[in-house]
Image (cartoon, rainbow, N blue to C red):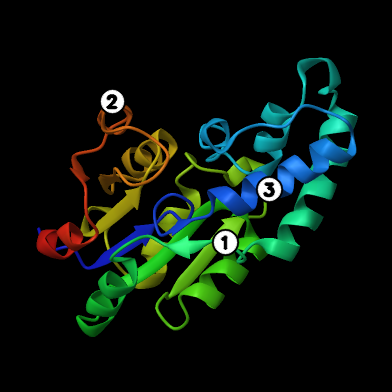
């Protein structure tokens, strides 16, 4: 099978955004006199959207729905200010995207990050590479729901099995399986190779250049 399109996750796959996300959330926690968390801890909070991250970051005794919603709004406000301050592409990603663009491979981003933030980060760091950039606008469509991935495939007029789904988390691999796309895990993000394989990864790569070899 010749793959004709790739859908990428954003955080932990294309960009290392851990520090900006963590700094924004810790600023919110500090303002409320709540305990903050280390970067290592935050890497396990990332992947299911910012609202979910907020609920995990709050102390158990202060995690009511109202508190989560209030802190989520503050978190988004803080994060929007700094979302590209420390966030950088992983090694080899820019070269990978340029190579794939030259080969006319269709590319998209599908993230559980808020849609506005997903589009802002992707357009500022990777201008002119993606046919579609989709973030979270409706909780019900959050990965591992494959709906948005399948919609991207339809716009490309490609069958799901002609598309690579590339991500760094168990949720990404589950999304690929649910969409009947080819799941490729990357080890430079926030999860281990074992977690990726256990979640359905058919292939795990250690360097961005290995994706070119697959194609």
Q: Do the residues labelled 3 and 1 touch (CB within 8 Å)?
A: yes
Which quadrant of the rendered structure holds the C terminus? bottom left
Above/below status of 109 relative to 47? below
- Point 71% across, 40% down: residue: 51
Residue 149 lies in what quarter of the image? bottom left
- Please report whichever mark, 3 or 1, sits nearer to the chain's N-terminal start: 3
95 shown above or below 44:
below
Residue 96's mark?
none
Within 10 Å of disc 2 (Cα), the crowding (few <14, some 14-19, many 20+) is few
Please tell me whether mark 2 sits on a helix, a strand or a loop: helix
Secondary structure at badge 3 equals: helix
Q: What element carries label 1?
A: loop
**Residue 198 disc label:** 2
The numbered mark at residue 23 is 3
Where is residue 118 drawn, in percent x and y? 58, 62
Of residues 206 and 170, the one drawn nearer to the viewer in this rendering: 206
Give me the disc on residue 86: 1
């Amino acid at each position: 099978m010749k793959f004709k399109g790739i859908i990428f996750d954003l955080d932990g796959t294309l960009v290392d955004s851990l520090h900006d996300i963590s700094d924004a959330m810790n600023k919110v926690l500090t303002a409320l006199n709540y305990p903050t968390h280390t970067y290592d801890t935050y890497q396990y909070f990332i992947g299911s959207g910012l609202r979910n991250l907020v609920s995990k970051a709050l102390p158990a005794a202060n995690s009511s729905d109202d508190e989560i919603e209030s802190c989520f709004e503050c978190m988004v406000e803080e994060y929007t200010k700094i979302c590209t301050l420390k966030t950088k592409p992983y090694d080899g990603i820019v070269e990978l995207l340029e190579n794939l663009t030259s080969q006319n491979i269709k590319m998209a981003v599908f993230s559980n990050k808020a849609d506005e933030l997903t589009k802002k980060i992707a357009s500022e760091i990777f201008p002119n590479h993606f046919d579609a950039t989709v973030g979270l606008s409706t909780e019900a469509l959050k990965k591992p729901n494959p709906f948005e991935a399948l919609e991207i495939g339809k716009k490309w007029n490609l069958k799901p099995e002609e598309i690579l789904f590339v991500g760094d988390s168990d949720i990404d691999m589950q999304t690929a399986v649910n969409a009947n796309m080819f799941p490729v895990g990357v080890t430079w993000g926030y999860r281990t190779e074992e977690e990726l394989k256990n979640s359905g990864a058919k292939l795990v790569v250690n360097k961005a250049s290995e994706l070119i070899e697959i194609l």
